[in-house]
Image: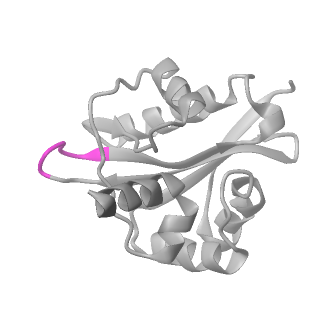
Amino acid sequence: MDEVHIRELLGFAEVRTIYQLTRQNSSLSQALFDERMGLMLAQGNYRCIAAHVGERMVGTSGFWIGTPLWTGKYCELDHVVLDAEARGHGIGGQLMQWIEREAERLGCDVLRVAMILGRDRTRSFYRQNSYPDDGLMLVKPLSAWAEGEFPEYAVHKAATRRS
């Protein structure tokens, strides 16, 4: 694979260019993507990077900077996506290294990521990039969209109704 270039995407118009790549892992419509991305950027603590080989975008990751009591200042990965054809070439690791360097530059105490249980390839990727399994995020879907997008939640909800 040719040389990979990673850079930050600035402004809504540029960040919006990740939509086609994120469609590989999400059923979000363009309208819903645009709405949510606009809200995320407006919060002021969300940023996004993309990896390119030549002109082709082959990977992207968003990240948030925040400070809760329990971790101190953190950087949280958000929606890491690699083009299916680009997987296995170290691009995901390069995205992680870029974000880690930026988090250190910003004085973050921890990097964190949330992922859905049962996604073994994703879990393996994070383990390979030094993210230990040391936490659990509990999620309760509150909308039909969330139940449809994350069937793992809907199955659990149905099971708890029967008990």
- Whether residue 21 is visible, yes or no, is yes
Farthest left residue?
69
Q: Is residue 146 magenta?
A: no
Q: Position of residue 3 (x, y in %)?
A: 81, 27
Relative to 117, is 135 on the left or the right? left
Give me the residue at 67% from left, 51% from top: 25
Position of the C terminus, as image quadrant, is bottom left
Give me the residue at 87% from left, 40% from top: 54
Q: Position of residue 112 (x, y in %)?
A: 35, 39
Please state the extent of the stretch shown in magenta in the rendering: 69-74
Position of the N terminus, as image quadrant, is top right
150 up-or-down from 143: above or below: above
32 up-or-down from 80: above or below: below
Q: Count of labels shown? A: 0
Relative to 158, is 73 on the left or the right? left
Q: Quadrant of residue 139?
A: bottom left
